[in-house]
Structure formats: structure tokens, C-alpha cells
Image (cartoon, grey):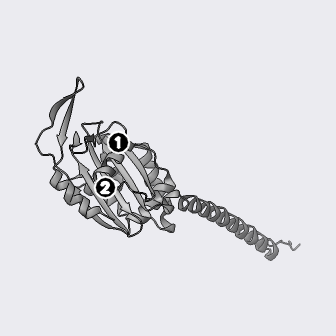
């Protein structure tokens, strides 16, 4: 007796399976695309896009004994200066310390020193890392240089366009886990939009003496490394808007 076989290659079943697979792929693409677009919209929205100047100070090491790197970018003409201050840096004529315990105060003191305290809208951010944390960030996302100022310059030269948002998220998450900071991801993203397209100048500031001197003020002794006023005057003329 002849046997009847039912073919497993049923066109209707195969068509249905293909349709389900395509539907799953489309849904997956929509979900991933929607998440990606939402992330981009969250990143591109920041108050730094509405100011004329953005400042970033980074302390590497402990307060006082650490190095201080300060970046300021004029968002109107895309001009950025990065300055490196030695440990115990002190502005003599202004009678203020660059190596302040509060990094916002340090930024205010630098702005006064550079005569940049005006009515222009600005925002200031800070980062504080020990030397090991800073080196970890440079190892993973930067390039080793002779001075932290040049290492920061290399980091800020990077641009993260729309298709590199995942790379930026990895960078910022690592930065955040290796520092104490007040900068949000959206602020950093937009800051780097400016800095990656800005002209960049690096200035290494040195003290008048090789080592700090001990000064007693109101019964309290503190170490100070006085900055050269001539260097400060030259710097003022360079960063003038």
C-alpha cells in the first residue's frame, strides 16, 4: 500500500514564520532606536548651551599638594585656554590661593586673576581625582603626556557625534567613577562639543621659587608658591575676550 506524506515545507507556515521574525526584528530596532534617540535628546539638553563661557577645573591629588588644571572656553568664538598650576599656587597681588579647599572658590580666584569676572553668563564645573584615578582615566581614554594640562587637552579634543553616544557614555561613566565632580553627563557632552571644535592653547604656570614658602597669617602657617605676575599679565592679554 502506498504511504501518503505531508510535506513540512508548507508555504503558508514558512511565510508566517518569516513574518514573525521580521516583526520581532522591527520591534527590536524600534526599541533600540527609541532608547538611543532618547539618550541623545537627554544629552544635548544642557544649560551650558546658553552661556558665553564654560570653566572646568581638575584637581589631581590632595588639596594644596595636588596639581590644578583649569580649562576655560569662550563659546562665542570657540577659543579655549588650558592652564596648569603648581601645588600651593598663590596669586600674590590678589591675595588669594589657587589651591583652595573649595574648587569653586579656586575657579572664582582664577577668574579674578584673569580679569574674566564680568557680566557675561558662565558656568563652572570641577573634577577631583587622586593621581591613580587620573592616570586610570588617561590610560583608558586619553594619551600620556608630560603635563596633565596636555592630557586634559587630548581628552577635550575628542568629539562624540550621534553614532558614538555609547562610547561617550562609557567615557563619562568611567570619569564619574574615578572622580568627585559636579558635572552632569549632558553638561560634559555639550562642553566637549565646544572644546573639540575650539582653538586650544596650553599654558604651564610656574612659581617664583622652586619650592613653596611658609607664611604665617593670623597665627596660622600655610605653604604658598607665589606665581609670577609677569606671566599672569601675559596670560590676561591672551584670554581677553
Residue 9 shows in the view: no
Q: Position of residue 88 (x, y in %)?
A: 22, 39
Image point 35% across, 64% down: which residue? 157
Question: In x, y percent, where is residue 227?
Answer: 18, 47
Disc 1 from disc 2: Cα separation: 28 Å
Q: Where is mark 2, residue-wise? A: 115
Q: Residue at x 52, y 57 (%)?
A: 47
Q: Earlier in the sequence, mark 1 or mark 2?
A: 2
Circle 2 SS class: loop
Furthest-bottom residue in view?
11
Query: Mark on residue 225?
Result: none
Q: Note whether 102 is above or below 76 in the view shown.
A: above
Q: Which residue is mark 1?
A: 129
Instruction: List x then y, in percent, for residue 89.
Output: 22, 42
Residue 119 horizontal/vertical position (percent): 43, 57
Quarter assignment of residue 53: bottom left
Q: Relative to the observer, which residue lies in front, 223 or 140?
A: 223
Q: Residues within 10 Å of mark 2 (few under 14, many from 20)?
A: some
- Crowding near pointer 1: few (<14 within 10 Å), some, many (20+)? many
The quarter of the picture where the N terminus appears is bottom right
Amino acid at each position: 500500500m502506498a504511504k501518503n506524506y505531508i510535506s513540512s515545507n508548507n508555504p503558508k507556515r514558512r511565510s508566517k514564520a518569516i513574518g514573525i521574525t521580521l516583526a520581532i526584528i522591527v520591534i527590536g530596532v524600534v526599541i533600540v532606536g527609541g532608547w538611543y534617540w532618547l539618550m541623545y535628546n537627554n544629552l544635548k539638553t544642557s544649560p551650558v548651551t546658553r552661556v558665553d563661557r564654560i570653566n572646568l577645573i581638575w584637581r589631581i591629588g590632595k588639596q594644596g599638594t595636588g596639581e590644578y588644571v583649569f580649562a576655560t572656553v569662550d563659546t562665542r568664538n570657540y577659543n579655549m585656554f588650558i592652564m596648569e598650576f603648581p601645588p600651593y599656587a598663590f596669586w600674590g597681588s590678589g591675595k588669594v590661593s589657587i589651591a583652595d579647599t573649595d574648587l569653586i572658590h579656586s575657579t572664582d580666584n582664577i577668574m579674578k586673576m584673569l580679569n574674566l569676572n564680568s557680566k557675561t553668563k558662565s558656568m563652572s564645573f570641577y573634577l577631583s581625582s587622586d593621581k591613580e584615578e587620573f592616570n586610570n582615566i588617561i590610560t583608558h581614554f586619553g594619551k600620556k603626556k608630560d603635563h596633565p594640562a596636555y592630557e586634559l587637552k587630548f581628552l577635550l579634543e575628542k568629539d562624540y557625534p550621534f553614532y558614538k553616544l555609547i562610547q561617550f557614555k562609557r567615557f563619562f561613566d568611567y570619569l564619574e567613577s574615578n572622580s568627585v565632580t559636579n558635572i552632569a553627563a549632558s553638561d560634559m557632552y555639550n562642553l566637549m562639543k565646544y572644546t573639540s571644535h575650539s582653538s586650544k592653547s596650553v599654558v604651564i604656570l610656574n612659581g617664583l621659587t622652586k619650592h613653596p614658602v611658609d607664611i604665617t597669617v593670623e597665627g596660622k602657617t600655610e605653604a604658598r608658591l607665589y606665581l609670577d605676575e609677569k606671566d599672569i599679565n601675559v596670560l590676561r592679554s591672551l584670554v581677553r575676550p
